[in-house]
Amino acid sequence: MLSKKNLKNCYALKRRRIESRLGEFRKVPHGRESLFSELAFCICAANSSAAAAGKAQAKLAEGDLLFSADAPRIAAVLLESHVRFHNNKARYIVEAREKLFEGGAMERMVADAKKEGSALPLRDFLALEVMGVGYKEAGHYLRNIGMGEEVAILDRHILKNLKSLGVIGDVPKSLSGKKYVSYEGKMRDFSRRMGIPLSHLDLLFWSEETGCIFK
């Protein structure tokens, strides 16, 4: 677990790797296929592992299943990839396809967010309006398409580090939207005090807990 004393030293050692990874996210195309693929990944990763979600994402992309398969076929792929709650998540993926991608809504919202210079309204929309996507998953999605500078991804690894550093007082079992935004604000203030960008701090905590800088 990181402490304030060694936080900046660890960041100095990993900064280039973190910047490189974030640079890869910024290269993700904002076309329909890539935007939907990354959203499906984040839906799969919720309450599951990023590795399993990555396997499912790759398998769905192989046969263009995201746009052609029904929920049972997608669920079979998720099950093969060891994604938890595969039936529910398959249904969420199909619902997201119908709501956001068949008419180009997501592409327009991403373009609008880039034009306005803030992805926070898009994050809030995804968290509140898309099944299977809460504040954490919405932030994860924005980070993975290169638009996550303003948001925190408050999973258990991040929360444990924030508590250890005295940024928050507890690690709750669940976060309401209001409490999520409150904790995110505390992490944002801490990142400013430490001189470490919010998106960098997220990957720094994650790498310390897991030993890798994944997605």
Image: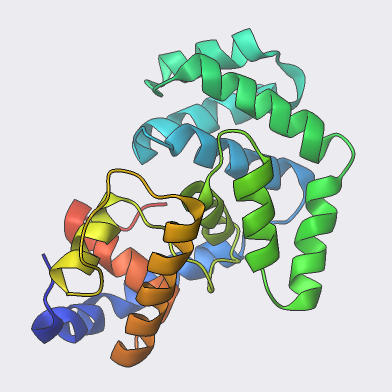
Q: Is residue 189 above or below residue 111?
A: below
Name the residue located 68 percent from the left edge and 74 percent from the top edge: 118
- In the image, taking residue 193 as reference, residue 116 lies left or right, namely right
Residue at 32% across, 91% down: 193
Front residue of 92/69: it is: 92
1 sits left or right of 118 in the view: left
Q: Position of residue 109 (x, y in %)?
A: 80, 57
Q: Quadrant of residue 61?
A: top right
Q: Residue 106 vs residue 63: left or right?
A: right
Compared with residue 157, is residue 33 higher up or lower down, i.e. above or below? above
The residue located at (82%, 66%) in the rendering is 112
> Is residue 184 visible to us here?
yes
Number of numbered discs on residues: 0
Residue 175 position within the rendered picture, expressed as x and y whole percent measured from the top left = 39, 50
Return the x and y of residue 183 as percentages of the image width and height. 38, 66
Residue 70 or 130: which is nearer the viewer? 130
| Position of residue 160 measured from the top left corner of the image (x, y, whole percent) | 20, 58
The colour scheme is rainbow
Q: Is residue 3 above or below residue 146?
A: below
Residue 64, by quadrant, is top right
Q: Tell me the residue at 90%/39% (across/down).
A: 103
Is residue 62 visible in the rendered image? The answer is no
